[in-house]
């Protein structure tokens, strides 16, 4: 199911983003979500003309980088309030090796 920012019955969603680095025709960004909607980052970035690299659903359809599988999206920090205990929980994960390699191969 493809989501949209223009749906008449759409739900409110807020994504804050900032540029970390510009890499030729690509931009490495960080996103912070106020809401957690389905495909939220992918939909918001595509709606402003900056789809995620490798996103064939919301992007241009074909990935311009050979061998890339899936969209270049990584959750470095996930935090939420536990529904039963009310305790805030946070989990972190480093960038996977393939993602680091990709960042190092893109032009500066």
Image (cartoon, helix red, strand yellow):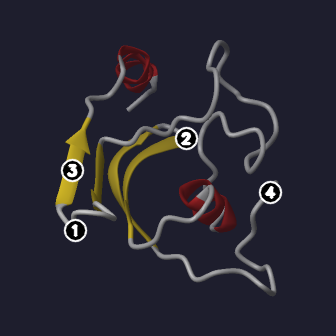
Few, some or many residues within 10 Å of mark 2 (<14, 14–19, 20+): few
Name the residue tied to disc 3: 90
First along the sequence among labels 4 and 3 = 4
First along the sequence among labels 1 and 2 = 2
Alpha carbon distance from label 1 to label 3: 13 Å
As rendered, which of 45 and 34 lies closer to the eye?
Answer: 34
Alpha carbon distance from label 4 to label 2: 26 Å
88 w.r.t. 65: above or below:
below
Give the quadrant of residue 39: bottom right
Q: Are marks 1 and 4 in contact (CB under 8 Å)?
A: no
| The residue positioned farthest toward the front in the image shown | 84
Name the residue tied to disc 4: 2
Instruction: Kindly report which numbered mark, 1 or 4, lies closer to the viewer in this rendering.
Output: 1
Point 42% across, 24% down: residue: 99
Q: Residue 66 placed where, x, y %?
A: 67, 15
Label at residue 86: 1
Q: Are marks 4 and 2 in contact (CB under 8 Å)?
A: no
Q: Residue 68 placed where, x, y %?
A: 62, 20
* Quadrant into which the C terminus falls: top left
Alpha carbon distance from label 4 to label 3: 29 Å
Label at residue 25: 2
Point 77% across, 79% down: residue: 6
77 w.r.t. 17: above or below:
above
């Amino acid at each position: 199911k493809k989501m949209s920012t223009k749906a008449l019955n759409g739900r409110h969603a807020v994504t804050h983003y900032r540029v970390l680095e510009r890499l030729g025709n690509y931009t490495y960004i960080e996103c912070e979500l106020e809401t957690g909607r389905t495909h939220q980052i992918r939909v918001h970035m595509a709606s402003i003309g900056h789809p995620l690299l490798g996103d064939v659903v919301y992007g241009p359809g074909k990935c311009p980088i050979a061998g890339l599988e899936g969209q270049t999206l990584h959750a470095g920090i996930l935090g939420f309030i536990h529904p039963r205990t009310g305790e805030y929980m946070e989990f972190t994960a480093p960038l996977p090796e393939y993602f680091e390699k990709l960042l190092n191969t893109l032009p500066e």
